[in-house]
Image (spheres, helix red, strand yellow):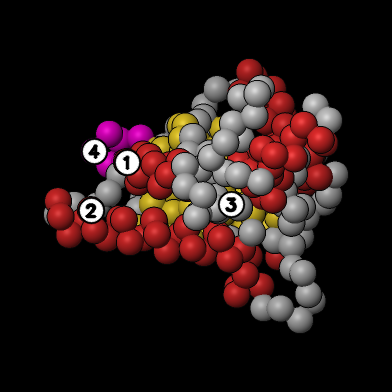
């Protein structure tokens, strides 16, 4: 489509083009990839893992101050990809929704219910001209003790929500998804260590980088330890050593 024919539809959030596209929502997906990061998530037998490269825009920045891992409830955490201010705004809203649910019903908001609620909010942002979609995507994990299984869910600026065995977001998401699909054809179930190392290997493969422990952020939940937490540098280093020994 020529620029002349798209210009009118570019300006308004709520108007579809003749091809049925919302250009402003599509541009939001491009904004997510501007920081050059790729995030991956894997659900194992009794665990779930999210991982991304820790890329600092300035060498003087404290690594912990720009973490993309956030705890939403004690047992649900997320990895945010996209514009950092928008990421923090969405996390704040998710925490508020989870707290309201806990106050109203007396138990912790399940991961899938929370992500579906965030998806509903994201979808409303695509209907109103006075609001803009947030330039970020949330990948959340938890271990549901009632269902006795790990959960991995993702939502995007359009409001779409989906559960996954494995997924990716960001600059190299297609390459990462292809890599994970091949992995899952050979290996259907993952232990905790296998899931962590598969996530690291995926990032290393698609980004063509050999990581140091300080260059990765990894969030985990498991049946043994259902509380969401980030792996320490020492734990990440141990997994990197195991990967190197396998190679």
In magenta, the rendered stretch is 144-149
Q: Residue furthest bottom?
A: 60
Provide the secondary structure element on which disc 4 rests.
loop
For marks 4 and 2, give the CA distance: 17 Å
Are discs 2 and 1 less than 8 Å apart at CB? Answer: yes
Left or right? Give the position of 223 relative to 9.
left
For marks 3 and 2, give the CA distance: 23 Å
For marks 3 and 4, give the CA distance: 30 Å
For marks 4 and 1, give the CA distance: 14 Å
Identify the mark at residue 136; answer none if there is no mark.
Answer: 3
Are discs 3 and 4 less than 8 Å apart at CB? Answer: no
Provide the secondary structure element on which disc 1 rests.
helix
Residue 226 part of the magenta segment? no
Look at mark 4 in the image and give the residue it sits on: 146
The residue sitting at 58% across, 52% down in the picture is: 136
Identify the mark at residue 113; answer none if there is no mark.
Answer: 1
Percent from the top left, x then y, of residue 218?
A: 58, 54
For marks 3 and 1, give the CA distance: 19 Å
- Residue 89 in sight from this viewpoint: yes
Our reading of the magenta stretch's main secondary structure is loop
Q: For marks 4 and 1, give the one nearer the viewer.
A: 1
The residue sitting at 70% across, 61% down in the picture is: 54
Up the image or down, 4 lies above or below 97; here it is above
């Amino acid at each position: 489509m020529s620029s002349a024919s798209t210009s009118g539809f570019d300006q308004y959030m709520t108007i579809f083009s003749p091809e049925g596209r919302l250009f402003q929502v599509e541009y939001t997906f491009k904004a997510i990839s501007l920081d050059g990061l790729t995030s991956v998530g894997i659900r194992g037998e009794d665990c779930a893992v999210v991982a991304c490269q820790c890329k600092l825009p300035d060498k003087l920045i404290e690594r912990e101050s720009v973490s993309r891992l956030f705890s939403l409830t004690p047992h649900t955490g997320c990895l945010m990809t996209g514009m950092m201010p928008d990421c923090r705004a969405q996390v704040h809203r998710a925490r508020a929704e989870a707290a309201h649910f806990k106050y109203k019903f007396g138990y912790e908001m399940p991961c899938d219910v929370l992500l579906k609620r965030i998806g509903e909010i994201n979808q409303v942002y695509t209907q109103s001209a006075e609001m803009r979609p947030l330039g970020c995507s949330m990948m959340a994990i938890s271990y549901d003790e009632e269902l006795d299984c790990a959960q991995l869910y993702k939502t995007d600026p359009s409001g779409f929500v989906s559960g996954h065995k494995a997924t990716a977001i960001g600059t190299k998401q297609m390459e990462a998804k292809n890599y994970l699909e091949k992995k899952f054809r050979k290996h259907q179930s993952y232990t905790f260590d296998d899931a962590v190392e598969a996530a690291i290997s995926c990032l290393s493969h698609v980004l063509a980088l050999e990581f140091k422990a300080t260059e990765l952020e990894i969030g985990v939940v498991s049946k043994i330890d259902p509380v969401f937490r980030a792996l320490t540098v020492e734990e990440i280093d141990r997994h990197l050593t195991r990967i190197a020994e396998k190679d």
